[in-house]
Image (cartoon, rainbow, N blue to C red):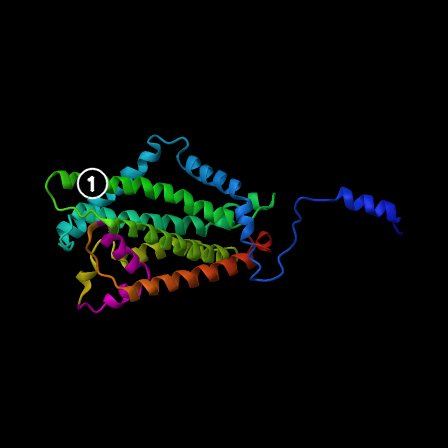
C-alpha cells in the first residue's frame, strides 16, 4: 500500500529523532566519539563502582590503607628478613610500598575489566550505551583507589624525611603521570581482550587470578631489577613490559631505578598493540555476546 506524499512527509517529521542507533558495520567501526557523548553516564558508573565497593563495610575506604600496610609488612618479613633481598639503598618499607601501590592499580584494573561482559550482562541486555563505558569507568574508579594508596606512600616517605633519612624530591615526580597512564592503558587493553574471550571460553576466568599472581613475581615489585643481574631467569623479567614501568615509577619517587629509553619504548609499543587488539575484539564481541554470555 502506498502512502500519500503529505502523510509521508508528516511521518518523517514525527520521526525526527535526536539520535539514531544503527549496527556497526566493521571491526574498525569503534565509534569512540560516543564515549564522550555519554561522559555523564561514565562518571555515574565511576561513582557506582566506588560506592558499591564499600557499601555495608566496617572500614570503607580505609581498606585502601590497611591492605598495602599489611602487604608491606609481609614483604618486609619474607623478602627483606628471610630472603635478605637488597632494596638498592631505598628504605625497605617505602620500596615495597611503592611496588605494591603501582601493582595494585594494574592488577585491580585488569581483573575488574576482565569481567566486563559477564558482570554487566543484565545491564547490557536492557539499554543501549557504548559498552566501552564500563571498562573505562573501572579504570577511573581504580585510579581513585590508587590515589589514596599514593597518599599513604607519600606519608611514609615524609616520615622518613623528618627522621633524617635521605628522601628524593624533585621534578622526577612528574614522571608518575605517564607511568600511571601507561599502566592504565595496559590494564585496559589486556582486560578487554580477556573479557572478550571469556564470553565464549569461560575457563579463562579461572586462569585470571593465577596469571596475575604469576605476573607479579615476574615484575620487580618485591625486588630491584639490579638483583637479577647475572641470573639465568632474568630474561623473563626483562621481557615483561611492566618491568620498565615499575622501575620508572621507583625512579620518579626515589631517583633510583634501572630502566632505559629503549625499554620504555618497548612498554609503550606493547601497550599500543594490546589496546588496539583489545578494542577490535571488544567491538566484535559486543555485537553478539548476549547470545553466548
Query: Mark 1, residues whose alpha carbon is within 10 Å: few (<14), some, or many (≥20)?
Result: some
Q: Nearer the viewer, residue 232 or 255?
A: 255
Q: Which residue occupies 26% across, 68% down? A: 235
Magenta segment main secondary structure: helix
Name the residue furthest left: 164
Give the percent coordinates (x, y) of residue 54. 39, 34
Residue 18 picture location, percent across and down? 67, 44
Q: Residue at x 43, y 63 (%)?
A: 273
Quick check: 54 left or right of 7? left
Quarter holding residue 152: top left
Q: Which residue is mark 1?
A: 156
Q: Residue at x 75, y 44 (%)?
A: 15
Q: Is residue 147 left or right of residue 29?
A: left
Magenta segment: 230-253
Does the segment drawn in magenta span residue 240? Answer: yes
Residue at the front extreme of this rendering: 171
Q: Relative to the observer, which residue lies in front, 81 or 31?
A: 31
Rendered position, 7 above or below 242: above
Q: Indicate the quadrant where residue 238 lies.
A: bottom left
Is residue 239 within the magenta segment?
yes
User: Relative to 47, does residue 100 appear above or below in the rendering?
Assistant: below
Amino acid at each position: 500500500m502506498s502512502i500519500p506524499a503529505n502523510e509521508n512527509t508528516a511521518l518523517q517529521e514525527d520521526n525526527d529523532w535526536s539520535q539514531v542507533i544503527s549496527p556497526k558495520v566493521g571491526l574498525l567501526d569503534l565509534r569512540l566519539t560516543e564515549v564522550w557523548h555519554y561522559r555523564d553516564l561514565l562518571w555515574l558508573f565511576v561513582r557506582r563502582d566506588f560506592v558499591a565497593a564499600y557499601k555495608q563495610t566496617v572500614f570503607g575506604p580505609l581498606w585502601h590503607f590497611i591492605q598495602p600496610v599489611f602487604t608491606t609488612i609481609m614483604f618486609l618479613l619474607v623478602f627483606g628478613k628471610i630472603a635478605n633481598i637488597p632494596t638498592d639503598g631505598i628504605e625497605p618499607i617505602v620500596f615495597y610500598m611503592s611496588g605494591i601501590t603501582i601493582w595494585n592499580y594494574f592488577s585491580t584494573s585488569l581483573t575488574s575489566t576482565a569481567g566486563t561482559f559477564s558482570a554487566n550482562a543484565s545491564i547490557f541486555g536492557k539499554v543501549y550505551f557504548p559498552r566501552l563505558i564500563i571498562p573505562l569507568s573501572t579504570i577511573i574508579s581504580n585510579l581513585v583507589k590508587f590515589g589514596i594508596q599514593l597518599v599513604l606512600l607519600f606519608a611514609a616517605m615524609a616520615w622518613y624525611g623528618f627522621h633524617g633519612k635521605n628522601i628524593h624530591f624533585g621534578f622526577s615526580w612528574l614522571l608518575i603521570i605517564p607511568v600511571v597512564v601507561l599502566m592504565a592503558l595496559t590494564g585496559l587493553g589486556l582486560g578487554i581482550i580477556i573479557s572478550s574471550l571469556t564470553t565464549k571460553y569461560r575457563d579463562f576466568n579461572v586462569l585470571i587470578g593465577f596469571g596475575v599472581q604469576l605476573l607479579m613475581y615476574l615484575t620487580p615489585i618485591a625486588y630491584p631489577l639490579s638483583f637479577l643481574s647475572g641470573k639465568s631467569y632474568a630474561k623473563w623479567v626483562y621481557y615483561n613490559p611492566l618491568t620498565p614501568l615499575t622501575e620508572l615509577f621507583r625512579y620518579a619517587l626515589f631517583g633510583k631505578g634501572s630502566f632505559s629509553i629503549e625499554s620504555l619504548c618497548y612498554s609503550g609499543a606493547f601497550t599500543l598493540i594490546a589496546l588496539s587488539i583489545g578494542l577490535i575484539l571488544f567491538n566484535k564481541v559486543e555485537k553478539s555476546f548476549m547470545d553466548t554470555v
